[in-house]
Amino acid sequence: MEDSPSSNQNTPMPDITSISPEPIINNNVHVLCYSVKTTGGVAGAGAVIYNGINRKDVIWEKSYNLGKCITHNIAHYTALLKGLEAAHSLGISNIIIENNNYLIGKQVLGEFQCKNEKLRPFYQNVVQMKNTVFDCFDVYTVKDVDSRVRHLAQTAAEVI
């Protein structure tokens, strides 16, 4: 049975290792959840920004049809960048990223190199934003992303 969008509201966040100088543990934290879905060769992405780690209030959400002939990892980087750009435009400076792509998470944290030339421009844009726009920036990878985000990505992938 699929979770409803509100079912994750009371789910505690897993332990997070901060890459910022100090751990993020204040009320100015926002959570960016994003995911991608491909249907019939068309990629869709969904992203949601929650106010606070308890995820009670959605302050921004959007779905994007990314078109055809886009790789899975490019779709993930595109969704991440769209969410980060939205966070920046909202004046957010402390952000936690939740995704379900291990490679992207490790690359953004600097634990893996980005060797793929097609991914490198996306990776460099994310790292530049991480280093210049946000005071605190953490990333963690989860097996299953927020059901609200999955729904946005699925809807976007079905738009032709």
Image (cartoon, rainbow, N blue to C red):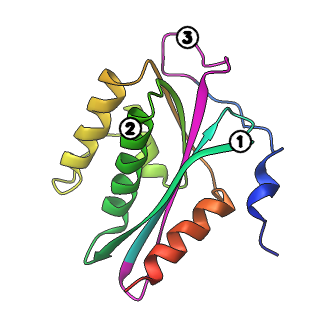
Q: Position of residue 142 (x, y in %)?
A: 62, 50
At 43% from the left and 46% from the top, the residue drawn is 83
Q: Which residue is mark 3?
A: 22
Question: Which amino acid lies under the numbered mark 1 shown in the image of this protein?
Answer: Arg
Q: Residue 47: give x, y in percent of width and height.
A: 50, 54
User: Horizontally, is 111 left or right of 51 in the view?
Assistant: left
**Vertical comparison of 6 with 15: above or below:** below
138 with respect to 128 (left or right): right
State whether residue 130 is above or below residue 56.
above
Badge 3 local density, few (<14 within 10 Å), some, or many (20+)?
few
Residue 20 seen in the figure: yes
Mark 2 neighbour density, 10 Å: few (under 14) some (14–19) many (20 or more): some
Q: Where does the magenta region start and end? A: 18-42
Q: Which residue is mark 1?
A: 55
**Residue 111 visible in the picture:** no
- Which element type, helix, strand or loop, lies under badge 3? loop
Kindly indicate the quadrant of the structure image that contains residue 64: bottom left
**Residue lying farthest top?**
21
Secondary structure under badge 2? helix
Q: Quadrant of the C terminus?
A: bottom left
Say whether residue 143 is left or right of residue 39.
right
Asked which quadrant contains residue 52, the reply is top right
Q: Earlier in the sequence, mark 3 or mark 2?
A: 3
Q: Residue at x 41, y 24 (%)?
A: 134
Q: Amino acid type of disc 3?
A: Glu
User: Which quadrant of the structure image shows residue 157?
Assistant: bottom left
Report the residue marked by disc 2: 108
Residues at circles 2 and 1 in contact by the CB criterion of under 8 Å: no
